[in-house]
Amino acid sequence: ICLFSATLNFDVMNTVYQFGANPVEINISRDQAKVDDVTDEILHVGERDKPQFLLSIILREKPRQTIIFSNYKNNVDRISNFLNLNGVPTVGISSLLTQSQRERVLQQFKLENERNTLVATDVAARGLDIKGVDLVINYDLPDDAENYIHRIGRTARAGSEGNALCLICPDDNAKWNAIN
């Protein structure tokens, strides 16, 4: 049995071990630790303060296109609704949507209109080529460095520069140290 994957995280390895007792990894390339044209910053905040900090960042930076990543699909609607209620037109995408709904949300986000903020789970971290994203915000830190690389790689595409910002709570310090 052969398995090919662009990423080799815990979920992929778990699947490999389910179907093969002695898997062999052949790695033809490794992701860089960080995309060269991405400036990444961290902001230490309390868990309950995240929504207000998120709103302040978006209003201060006035990005053309923003992707906000959450680890939890149930947070996508909550964050989207909060931003919409506070004057930041936002759409959300997660595994709770059907494929056709996801495609419709992505089309809305890609259009040059007022819906230039996307809240997403890791379903939007890979395989999407969206030009013009100038800010990625990790509302929740991903579980591993590889997912972090994919998330911040949504900005600074095709030679452009981009920014990535992480909202880090005290409970996230160990995760951040593992990523950084």
Image: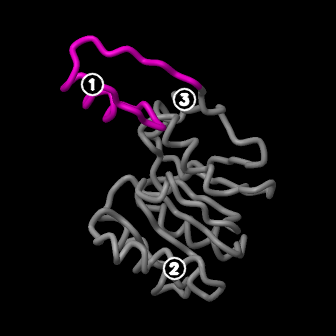
Which sits earlier in the primary sequence, circle 2 or circle 1?
A: 1
Q: Secondary structure at mark 3?
A: helix
Q: How many marks?
A: 3
Q: Residue at x 76, y 56 (%)?
A: 158
Q: Main secondary structure of the magenta part?
A: loop
Please indicate whether residue 97 sits to the left or right of residue 68 in the image.
Answer: left
> Quarter holding the C terminus?
top right
Q: Secondary structure at mark 1?
A: loop
Q: Residue at x 47, y 46 (%)?
A: 141
Q: Which residue is mark 2?
A: 107
Q: What is the span of residues highlighted in magenta in the rendered image?
A: 1-28
Q: CA distance from mark 1 to mark 3?
A: 36 Å
Q: Which residue is mark 3?
A: 177
Q: Residue at x 24, y 22 (%)?
A: 17
Q: Residue at x 35, y 77 (%)?
A: 101
Q: Amino acid at mark 1?
A: Ile
Q: Amino acid at mark 3?
A: Asn
> Residue 116's spot in the image, x, y percent?
60, 79
Q: Which residue is mark 1?
A: 1
